[in-house]
Amino acid sequence: MTKKITIALDCMGGDKSPDIVVKGACQVAKENKNIHFIFYGDLDLVNPLLEKYSILKDRYSLIHTTENISSEDKPSVALRRGTKSSMRLAINSVKDGQSDAIVSAGNTGALMAMSKIVLRPLAAVDRPAIVTYVPNQKQTATVMLDMGANIDCNSEVLYQFAVMGHAFAKTVLKIENPKIGLLNVGSEDLKGSDAVKNAAALIRESDIADSFYGYVEGDDIAKGTVDVVVTDGFTGNITLKAIEGTAKMISSYLKEGLGGSLLAKIGYLLSSTSLKRVFKRIDPRLYNGAMLVGLNGVVVKSHGSTDATGFANAIKVAISLVKDKINDTIIREVKSSGLDIEEE
Amino acid sequence: MTKKITIALDCMGGDKSPDIVVKGACQVAKENKNIHFIFYGDLDLVNPLLEKYSILKDRYSLIHTTENISSEDKPSVALRRGTKSSMRLAINSVKDGQSDAIVSAGNTGALMAMSKIVLRPLAAVDRPAIVTYVPNQKQTATVMLDMGANIDCNSEVLYQFAVMGHAFAKTVLKIENPKIGLLNVGSEDLKGSDAVKNAAALIRESDIADSFYGYVEGDDIAKGTVDVVVTDGFTGNITLKAIEGTAKMISSYLKEGLGGSLLAKIGYLLSSTSLKRVFKRIDPRLYNGAMLVGLNGVVVKSHGSTDATGFANAIKVAISLVKDKINDTIIREVKSSGLDIEEE
């Protein structure tokens, strides 16, 4: 018999919670028999939703709290005042062993700050990071990190990101031998900052050397040149948002353009199955679920504005990470590199 | 009578030169009576092309050279060995006052290195930068700099980029009071690196303070939140290429999707006028022409893989910059800031 997995769900984070959280859990419950949920949130808001769905019967607990971290709260404020918030209680449950993972659509900065304090970084890891994945032209996905947790990153930190991204690609995307690229402004050896150049040297000396492709450029993300793109949190965050913004702009141009003349409308109807397939390939809901990687515990961040299908995808990411014991892989690979990691 | 403007054209740089250079010049010559061209390149290759187009008659000179900078040449090699290259001779002609501007589709690093040596940075400017513009959702364009000339940038340098981007937006895009944003990982004051935070403070104390919007994020580029997005060359280069890569990926998905079933093909035909309008809005040729800004002279870089229409657009950018005396504006605005700029 498969082992039961328990997922802690923050019911108060994000734009459309608790609605999308409960509905997302239902979608996952239908497909997975061995999943149990602990919902953290306001009983008055969450209970009526839970009672609607028979699929969840006997498969959840509900921990009541009315406290909540808002999207505007600074991490420092969240740490100080949010000790009874739904997010904090859900993270605590991972620490206490009641849950195997937590999923939240709430404030990313607060989620990272609280997770660091409560769960602590893995002994082998210097800086936890945010890892996510985006569609690419090869019709697979490109894993990217760090998406904004660390503004400045030295070469050791970038090297660890490579290890963690490699483990994420194997675990979540089931890529057997993921290729790693370091994001840079050119492919020649002399290009880039010292941190990037030294990180390349570290990777080449490490156990993951065979998986290292070398430098990649911004357009290699969409091309799918490599499976894992490594960069600092400043560039990563800006690049990811620029990609999302561009996809949204073109989608809105298309919808506007195809809604124009009568001929265009008829044309749209005739080609709509094909167009829907195109939109589905770049559907951000299918890429929802960023891991806060490098912590003693599995923490998954959902987009704040996603819907139930998107949130369900984030839960599925968490389940993959738990099943495949991603942290064991990370600890093993970082340690085997022989890097002398110092705590900050 | 309008003053005659002379544009120096590097006929050897880029994938499809000299063909696109001569054809692009013809397109511009048809629309502009007062433009004269100096073509730099191999007589045997360029002359047969020039003789084909009567519109160019009596409106050009041709300077023969068989030497050429390749796209693989490092800037240091180009400087040392490229003194008789088409690119170098074209830059020299701006220095000597024979031309008002140079346009090249060649190696960007070599073009910047040679331009710095030959033309020198403006007295008021610490670091020349590469400025370009991309489509946005407001159906205008967003100016971005630096696109890769400077990997590390301190706050003074970022401030100067803001001034230069502001002048570019006024000159090329004819925006009366361009809004400036500093690219960052969040909009709150505490976010970002010290360089970015200090640059914000410098802009707020300067003459362009009224044009300063504050921090913007990656998705604000496509949203068109501001007219000018300022960032260091590392992040700028990667972000620009990520945007281009995403647009290409979606275009290829669409073309593939709409070429699928018979219904999709009929649908595409019926809606093709509307779709063409969409593709036109994001057509990279209309956004071709990056300025190497902050130099004693107007230097414009065309995409290496563009066609004649794209190259013509780059020439038009150069003409705007010359007509509106962009460097006078930059010198005035940087000087009026009272910054104590030191040469590096």
Image (spheres, coloured by chain):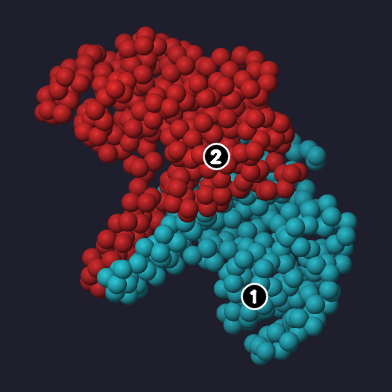
Chain colours: A red, B cyan
Q: Residue A182, located in which quarter of the rendered image?
A: top right
Quarter-wise, where is residue B41 in the image? bottom right
Compared across the picture, whether B184 is left or right of A107 comes to: right
Share a chain, discs 2 and 1?
no
Which image quadrant: the C terminus of chain A? top right
Q: Amino acid at mark 2?
A: Asn
The crowd level at tag 1 (other Cα within 10 Å; few <14, some 14-19, many 20+) is many
Residue name at image x 42 percent, y 22 percent = A298
- Tell which of B204 and B215 is nearer to you: B215
Q: Is residue A193 left or right of A10 when viewed as pictured?
A: right
Residue B14: percent from left, percent from top: 68, 66
How far across and down, in percent of the image, does residue A207 sit? Answer: 65, 30
Q: Which residue is mark 1?
A: B20
Label 2: which residue?
A177
B99 or A300: which is nearer to us?
Answer: A300
Identify residue type, mark 1.
Ile
User: Which residue occupies 60% across, 23% down?
Assistant: A334
Q: Secondary structure at mark 2?
A: loop
Q: CA distance from mark 2 to mark 1?
A: 43 Å
